[in-house]
Image: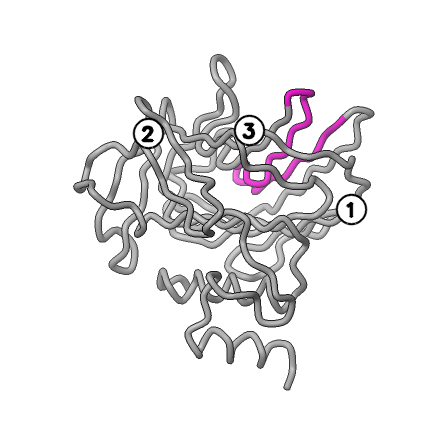
């Protein structure tokens, strides 16, 4: 049985990220699905987004949370970020800069301006932009001291006005980005070893240059490992099937 057959068989049998990945026995470190939000009505602001991984990395924002959209994509809910003030954070989730994989079900309003969708940063200034839209590009940036950085841009990848699954798989020697399980870029670079700090969803930072995200997010997963091809494809296929993305 080929790797592709293993992945498809696992998804067809009802595999979800709640179980170990088909070939690598990996579980997500954090997992947010809009369908897990309870006790809220359509159009209301979301103050807390629970973590389905079992690791208790909920996202929260008391006053500027995104808006809940019921039955928005393939009969499932999503969250709307207004592009000017909405965001959520978690201060305890950490990932290693050299080994992580991230997945996002996203529908940007536009990709014409810089927008930070997911962002990690340590107190020492190390920044990871796993998902950052800029000028019709899907961008990942890794920086540190001494500076070692990588810009990975997938033009004609993530686009505004439609639902897509974006993914980035990172190792010590570079990163590969995917849109709807199609490889967009593979960039070789030395990535500085560091452990991330605060996670922000929907913005880069407070104040000027916040780079707020405008659009919708239905689900996001964070793995603190570099997933192999079979496991990465299984997560992508699970998300695409769930949300009716082709």
Q: Could you say whether the residue bearing mark 3 is in a helix, strand or loop?
A: strand
Q: Nearer the viewer, residue 10 or 38?
A: 38
Front in this rendered view, residue 187 or 56? 56
Which secondary structure, mark 2?
A: loop
Q: Quadrant of the C terminus?
A: bottom left
Residue 173, horizontal then vertical, whole percent: 80, 47
Is residue 130 found inside the magenta-colored segment of the image?
yes
Q: Position of residue 32 (x, y in %)?
A: 42, 47
Foreground: 137 or 54? 54
Relative to 23, does residue 132 appear above or below in the rendering? above
**Horizontal arrangement in the rendering, residue 13 relative to residue 178 (left or right):** left
Between circles 2 and 3, the one closer to the viewer is: 3
Q: Which residues are magenta?
A: 123-144
Residue 3 colored in magenta in the image = no
Q: Please indicate whether residue 95 sits to the left or right of residue 12 in the image.
A: right
Q: Residue furthest left?
A: 41
Residue 198, labelled with which disc?
3
Crowd around label 3: few <14 · some 14–19 · many ≥20 (10 Å):
some
Tell me whether circle 2 and circle 1 mark residues in contact (CB < 8 Å).
Answer: no
Residue wearing tag 1 = 172
Residue corresponding to mark 2: 65
Residue 231 quadrant: bottom right
């Amino acid at each position: 049985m080929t790797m592709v057959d293993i992945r498809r068989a696992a998804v067809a049998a009802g595999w979800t990220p709640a179980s170990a990945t088909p070939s690598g026995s990996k579980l997500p470190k954090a997992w947010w699905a809009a369908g897990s939000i309870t006790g809220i009505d359509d159009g209301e602001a979301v103050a807390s987004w629970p973590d389905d991984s079992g690791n208790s990395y909920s996202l929260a924002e008391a006053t500027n949370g995104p808006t809940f959209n019921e039955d928005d994509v393939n009969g499932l809910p999503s969250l709307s970020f207004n592009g000017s003030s909405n965001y959520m954070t978690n201060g305890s989730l950490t990932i290693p800069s050299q080994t992580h994989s991230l997945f996002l079900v996203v529908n940007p309003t536009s990709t014409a301006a810089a927008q930070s969708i997911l962002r990690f940063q340590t107190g020492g200034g190390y920044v990871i932009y796993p998902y950052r839209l800029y000028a019709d590009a899907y961008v990942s940036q890794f920086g540190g001291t001494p500076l070692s950085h990588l810009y990975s841009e997938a033009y004609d990848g993530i686009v505004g006005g439609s639902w897509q699954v974006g993914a980035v798989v990172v190792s010590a020697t570079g990163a590969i980005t995917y849109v709807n399980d199609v490889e967009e870029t593979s960039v070789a670079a030395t990535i500085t070893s560091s452990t991330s700090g605060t996670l922000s969803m929907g913005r880069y930072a407070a104040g000027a240059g916040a780079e707020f995200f405008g659009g919708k997010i239905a689900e996001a997963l964070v793995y603190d490992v570099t997933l192999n091809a079979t496991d990465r494809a299984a997560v992508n296929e699970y998300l695409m099937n769930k949300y009716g993305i082709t």
